[in-house]
Amino acid sequence: MGQKPGTGSGENTESDTGENSEIQTAAHGQVDAGTRQTFYLWEEGNMPSETEYTENNGGYADDPDFRPTVRTFPVPEGTEVKGAVLICAGGAFQYRSDQLDDSYVPDELDQVSADASACGMIYAFYGRLSVASTDVEKFGESDLPPTYFAYGTRDPFVEEFEECIQALEEAGVPVESQVLEGMPHGFGAEGGWIDGYDQWLGSIFAEG
């Protein structure tokens, strides 16, 4: 689930990457497996949360009228399809509120299963804001998928990662970790973690 930078106004835009310029909604849009597309997650005026963000006075990527979107990235023709990966980009927990809006009306998107085969915590953790969850009982009751952690030793949240990992292991959740020596928070695709994660994720997909 991603945000489309620079399109807070919700206007349709043309991309130089071959992306379809017509933005449809996830519940009613037509998917083209060979084209990069962007879909609004919810219908206009009907989102399940409300925000207190009313003015873009901090140089944020999105204005207050931003509509959440998901963008598809199909694999090149001839590439073996191993599975689908949903990437939820970070943003310092500053841009969205998770308060539910009482006026929200459930739609077709709510009927889609959110079950995941695996979870990748790339300098992230189960928890809220900058505090990791360590609730072993809740983890055990939540039927969580195998989880992969990748983080750097210079990350200020190292202790949070380690406490979350320990709680998950105590709850019986399969966990694999890749600790990157000397790497800070927010390293993106750097640090050499992708190959290891790809191999781990491929083994999860292969197991069905």
Image: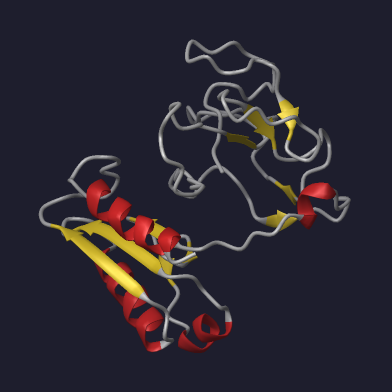
Q: Which residue occupies 65% across, 27% down?
A: 32
Q: Position of residue 193 (x, y in %)?
A: 23, 50
Task: Give the vertical position of 202 relative to 61 (above or below).
Answer: below
Task: Give the vertical position of 179 relative to 88 (above or below).
Answer: below
Determine which quarter of the picture holds residue 163.
Answer: bottom left
Residue 134 is at least partly visible in this image: yes
The number of discs equals 0
**Residue nearer the viewer, 64 or 134:** 134
Q: Which residue occupies 51% across, 28% down?
A: 61
Q: Quadrant of the N terminus?
A: top right
Residue 64 is at least partly visible in this image: no
Determine which quarter of the picture holds residue 207.
Answer: bottom left
> In screen coordinates, is 14 left or right of 146?
right
Point out the residue furthest to the left here: 182
> In screen coordinates, is 186 left or right of 58?
left
Q: Position of residue 44 (x, y in %)?
A: 81, 33
**Residue nearer the viewer, 105 or 30:** 30
Task: Give the vertical position of 14 relative to 170 (above or below).
Answer: above
> In screen coordinates, is 140 left or right of 23?
left
